[in-house]
Image: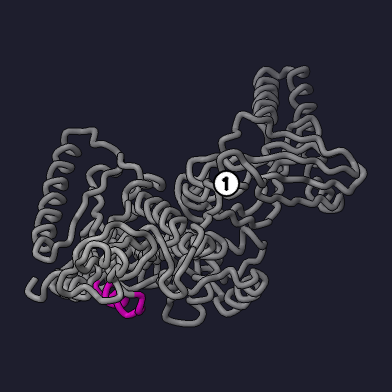
Amino acid sequence: MLPIPTRAAVLGFFSVLACLLIGAVSASLPATTLGAAGAIGLASALAATMPLARRARRQRLEFAWWLAQGDPGAGGGAAVPGTPFEVRCFLRHRGQDTLRVSGLDAVVPGSATRVDLDEPDGLVLAPSTRTDFTFRFVAPAVGRVVLHGLSMMMQGPLGLFEVPLYFPNPLVIKVLPQSAARHPTQARAIPGLPVERSGRSLLAPRGGGTELRELREMRPGDPFKSIAWKPSAKRGKLLVREVEEELQETRVVVLDVSGTMRGGEPGHRKLDHAIEAVAAEARRTLAGGDRFGVVTVDGRVLAHVSPRDGGAHVLRVFDALLAATEVVDEDLTDVDEDEVVAVVGRYVRQQDGLDFSTGTTWNVPPLVRHVERALASEDGKAGPAAATGPSGVMLRRFCQVRGIPLPYRPDPRQGAKGPAIAAALRGLATNGLGPMTITCITDLDGLGPPEGLLGALKWLRLRGHVVSFVVHDGTTFGKPPGSPLERQLADVYGRGERRRVDEFRALLAPLSIGLRVATASEAPAGLLRARTRPTQAPSVGE
């Protein structure tokens, strides 16, 4: 790669050019001599700088980096949104010449920003030494941050020219929800029952339990095993024991991850707010000894984490939430197969130094073989991807692993959101875990005809499940309007949002299903506080 002139070289070039022009116009020998000497000096500096790249390769520079453990507030090294995390690096210089480098920077997409820009960006690499340095980044939202490599400049003689160097070395960093910064989830001690273990949900069954609440007179329908014989003998009438028993509750969240939930800046989107709420509720529920599950939906079910208990289960929930931020499926993204080939081809050319282009097109078969070899070395990090052909699947999985963003489809397929949520709700009732508390998080945008969804909700309520909705108010997310036109548009959009919520709330009222509107200013950790489920389901006529 050709050297790049510094500001000093540019100033020197114009100074030399001015001297030569003055000498030519005024026939001044000193000016001409000075300009010629300067030109020879610049040419000599350029010639001395050009072999620096080859010399650096002979010096066998080695670069490595890793996520620092134990960052304050980051949960033992796990990155969380809004909290700076530290990446530690080193350059090992095995050669015998002193090297000066500057402009050290990590190649990272817009999912993270550096916060240490005031630190010196130059290093002197002494022979046969290892030089350590650090970068600090902040991620705005849950997801994955991929640092693709290190770029820097090697200075030539007199600092007139620099040679760019690049070390490709992808580093994947998971950015977990804010609740991951807390202490690891510890489930409550289970005194337990072998099948339905205890949790925090208080119920009052008759005839059995763990804690006596009261003695009362026997009423028709009370089981005989609940009779307290000794107190009955003393009082001369039949008394039964009323006890309280803690039963394990099952909570499930159905999360809408469609394009309408993704609008806005990362960290300030409806989806970001919802993910933080689900993660916080998962930690709280599992810590209480109850079961928790999550289903992500966009036109179809994308991920289904079955309800389980135990502190380790929270990692499965987190993985499903992270997967919702890196969807690369063909039917959910706004790029076709040819555009994916071009994106991957340009990335491989820059990152791996291999050019699979043939003029205006791309040589797809060798590109796919290279991607397949790269994925084989990733130890199963690639998740599933949906595409029309095997080559498209391979390229999209590569984009997912390497953190190459593919634009998400902005609008859900016409009328597909409502049926997909209905199918997810119907699927929950077949898990055999008994009555559940189900919360559906959506924005109702593009929901389509509600008949299928209402049928699924009625079916769930008749089987004793408690269902509620949390609807994000889109008017509170994003930047406030500035111009009069923006304010008028925001007012029209706000009226449409309120009308949609009011109409859907009216449809849910006959089913005794609650609806809560969530705003951007509301803390996500308190959005999904569990409610004790009612002991009776609605009547068949509801």
Q: Is there any visible trace of residue 31 in the rendered image?
A: yes
- Which corner quadrant holds the C terminus? bottom left
Above or below, 15 relative to 542 = above
Residue 406 seen anywhere in this rendered image of the structure: no
Q: Is residue 412 left or right of residue 74?
A: left
Indicate the position of residue 10 as horizontal and vertical percent values: 65, 30
State the residue in front, 240 or 365.
240
Q: Which residue is mark 1?
A: 75
Residue displayed at 53% across by 72% down = 362
- Relative horizontal placement of residue 288, taking residue 19 as reference (left or right): left
Residue pictured at 62% horizontal, 58% vertical: 350
- 455 or 397: nearer the eye? 455
Residue 541 rendering spot, x and y as whole percentages = 7, 74
Is 399 a magenta residue?
Answer: no
Q: Could you tell me residue 233's position as x and y percent?
A: 27, 67
Amino acid on which the number 1 mark rests in the picture: Gly
Decide if residue 236 is on the left or right side of residue 393: left
Residue lying farthest to the bottom in this orientation: 389
Give the crowd class for mark 1: few <14, some 14-19, many >=20 residues within 10 Å: some
Could you tell me how many numbered marks the image carries? 1
For this rendering, which residue is in front, 307 or 41?
307
| Residue 226 found in image quarter | bottom left
Q: Quadrant of residue 354?
A: bottom right
Q: Quadrant of residue 202?
A: bottom left
| x and y percentages locating residue 172 in the rendered image | 60, 57
Residue at 28% of width from left, 67% of height from top?
205
Q: Which residues are magenta?
A: 422-433
- The figure's colour scheme reads one colour
The residue sitting at the right extreme is: 96
